[in-house]
Amino acid sequence: MSRTPLTGRLAPIMPGRDLAATVSFYGRLGFAAEAHQPGDGYLILVRDEAELHFFHAPDTDPLTTAHAVYLRLDGGAHVVDALHAEWLATGLSEDPYATPRLVEPDDTVYGMREFALVDPDGNLLRIGAVLEATEG
């Protein structure tokens, strides 16, 4: 049996307590609503090739939700740093106890440069790219 190729986009589905507020928050980060009808309980946000889906979940506790997504970028560590700087310029807090917040970029033991964003609903977005190999 032949394998069917997996092409297209993968999109996480995360909770949002107030989808209009979710549109506003992610709009500051360069995302636009591709599909959202107030009252329908579902939202699709897109930025370039990245796509995030949200379902209306007004009882979500931002301190205990376990929803997360990893956005793996092409282009290396400098792209991660540039995106972090862009989002930091929107005024997001780097306070580790704030919600929402940004966590500064770091190089991991598994060869990625990454940072994290926690949105107002407690959803975790980890953004990273493969570290370029260094010649020695």
Image (cartoon, rainbow, N blue to C red):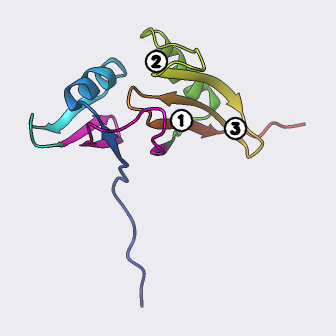
Q: What quarter of the picture does the C terminus occupy?
A: top right
The label shown at residue 127 is 1
Q: In terms of depth relative to the viewer, which is nearer, 44 or 98?
A: 98
From the top left corner, tell me how far across and down residue 44 is, in percent. 23, 41
- The amino acid on which the numbered mark 1 sits, given as a three-letter code, is Ile
Graded by Cα atoms within 10 Å as few (under 14), some (14 to 19) or many (20 or more), the crowding at tag 3 reads some
Q: Is residue 66 magenta?
A: yes
Q: Are marks 1 and 3 in contact (CB under 8 Å)?
A: no
Question: What residue did someone put label 2 on?
Answer: 87
Identify the residue position indicated by label 3 in the image: 131
Question: Residue shown at 50%/21% (left/top)?
Answer: 101
Q: Amino acid at mark 2?
A: Trp
Q: Earlier in the sequence, mark 3 or mark 2?
A: 2
- In the rendering, which numbered label is found on residue 16? none
> Label 3 sits on what residue type?
Leu
Which class describes the residues within 10 Å of circle 1: few (<14), some (14-19), or many (20+)? many
Q: Which residues are magenta?
A: 42-69
Question: Where the N terminus falls, by quadrant?
Answer: bottom left
Residue at disc 1, secondary structure: strand
Taking the image as shown, residue 19 lies to the left or right of residue 124, namely left
